[in-house]
Image (tube, helix red, strand yellow):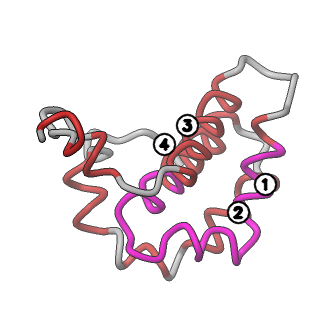
Amino acid sequence: MIWHRACTDSFACSVVLSFCVVNRKVIALLDKSDSELTQTVACSDLGEFARFHPDGKRIITQFGGKNKLMALMAQKSGSGKVTSAALLAVQKLMVNNWEHLAPGAKNKKTDE
């Protein structure tokens, strides 16, 4: 896996439903790949899947992705890029409502 200029929010949103098919393979890359770049991109892809797919969090957890991301997050070796990418992916798994975090989103409690 490599970073590509198509790795943007709009791209992720448009292909997230077709990503369900390859989700298990991406999760497998988290611990089977020796490449930091591959692991970093896999973490990023899983985070975006969790963010945009309606059942993304459940699917990632069901296939063991959450546990693998947590293990990478606790990893002490390497440059730290994989650890940071895993942390960001886990954060995306934990957030329940992305609309409230969007720039310009209004908080109902403060607007009333």
State the separation of the CA atoms marked 1 and 4: 20 Å
The image's mark for residue 2 is 4
State the separation of the CA atoms marked 2 and 4: 19 Å
> Position of 112 compared to 85: left or right?
left
Q: x and y percent of residue 103 in the render?
A: 18, 33
> Position of 1 compared to 7: left or right?
right
> Position of 59 compared to 29: left or right?
left
Q: Residue 49 colored magenta?
A: yes
Disc 1 to disc 2: CB gap under 8 Å: yes
Question: Which three-letter amino acid code belongs to the residue tagged 2?
Answer: Gly
Label 2 element class: helix
Q: How many marks?
A: 4
Tag 1 residue = 68
Q: Residue at x 37, y 55 (%)?
A: 97
Magenta region? 46-71
Q: Residues within 10 Å of mark 1 (few under 14, many from 20)?
A: some
Q: Residue at x 48, y 53 (%)?
A: 45
- Work out which quarter of the rendered image holds the C terminus and state it: top left
Tag 2 residue = 65
In front: label 1 or label 4: 1
Q: x and y percent of residue 34 in the render?
A: 79, 42
Label 3 element class: helix
Q: Residue at x 65, y 74 (%)?
A: 24
